[in-house]
Image (tube, rainbow, N blue to C red):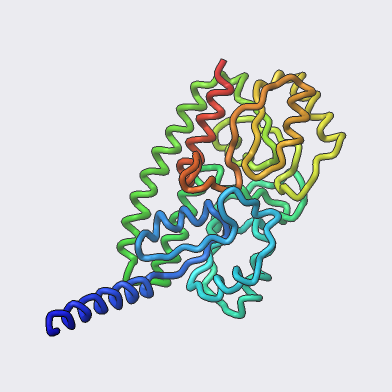
Amino acid sequence: MFRFCNVITLVLSVMLGSAAYADDKVPVVASFSILGDIVQEIGGERVTVSTLVGANADAHVFQPAPQDAKRVAEAKLVVTNGLGFEGWIDRLIKASGRKPMVVVASKGISAIKSKDDHGHDGLDPHAWQDVGNVKRYATTIAAALAKIDPEGANDYAQREAAYQSKLDALDAEIKASITAIPVERRKLITSHDAFGYFAKAYGMTMIAPQGVSTETEASAKDVAKIIRQIKAEKIPAMFLENVTDPRLIEQISRETDIKIGGKLYSDALSAPDGLAGSYIAMMENNIREMKKALLP
């Protein structure tokens, strides 16, 4: 009986210890999947990350549910992209009834203007498409985590440094891949205008029938203009995106005889076991598909 009681005591202590460890983790809410991955990379085992807009989901048309307000209410930190990307976030935080610390990951970056005025304060919010901007995201997130969890500051700093090295390698990989593509072929069509930062950072021409928000619809005039541009400039490739309706790109493909290349991930990651289960995997997939379609 004594031995049995000791075993029960040991099991209970392990269970209680595990629960305490779990409770010690910092609860963080990230607005969408790409940010969630970056937060997890830096936070590691010290954080529990909950993502509002998940894999293959479109933050432009997201409608928060009551359980999302509950998640925000339980969070110590909320990480947003900013630049008008999450038009619903302020209402959601208010609905939660709490005031968690909120950090805007894009703070301090040099934003570019959008080509339309549909819901993003005149700015293009897709700053993560430039790896250099994600390096700043990482620094901002690490500082926020250290502020809310000072005991983990050294751990966050070390994890950020390791992640920064991975981002440097990714940036170099993208630049090398672009360099391999002849200059006259560094242009393509995507579903919506999510790649402006990528184009600017890496010397590409990216054309889209939709604006920076998937909530907008391309007019017949817009589509006709793009078709003329494709024929005049002999644009070699077009791509579907994981968060957009494929029908518009399929229509343009039929009218121009340009084959559709692979799928690009723009505003969301894939499922964890997919081709773009992390930010780095997403960017590697995108440049791999571009290179495959654009090389002669």
Give the camera-side residue of 22 and 198: 22
> Residue drawn 70% across and 40% down?
192
User: For the image shown, how many numbered marks are present on the structure?
Assistant: 0
Q: Is residue 31 above or below residue 238?
A: below
Q: Residue at x 76, y 21 (%)?
A: 256
Residue lying furthest top: 296
User: Residue 141 at what x, y percent from top left?
Assistant: 46, 60
Residue 182 on image: x %, y %: 56, 18
The image quadrant where one finds the N terminus is bottom left
Left or right, residue 41 beside residue 229: left
> What percent of the width, then of the height, locates residue 288?
50, 30
Residue at 79% x, 26% y is 227
- 84 left or right, relative to 279: right
Q: Nearer the viewer, residue 62 or 123?
A: 62
Residue 258 lies in quadrant: top right
Percent across and percent down for residue 24 are 36, 74
* In this rendering, position of residue 138 left or right of residue 70: left
Above or below residue 45? Residue 235 is: above
In front here: 181 or 40?
40
Q: Residue furthest right?
A: 221
* Residue extending furthest toward the front: 1
Identify the image quadrant of residue 219: top right
Quadrant in which the C terminus is drawn = top right
Compared to residue 233, the image places residue 211 above or below, namely below
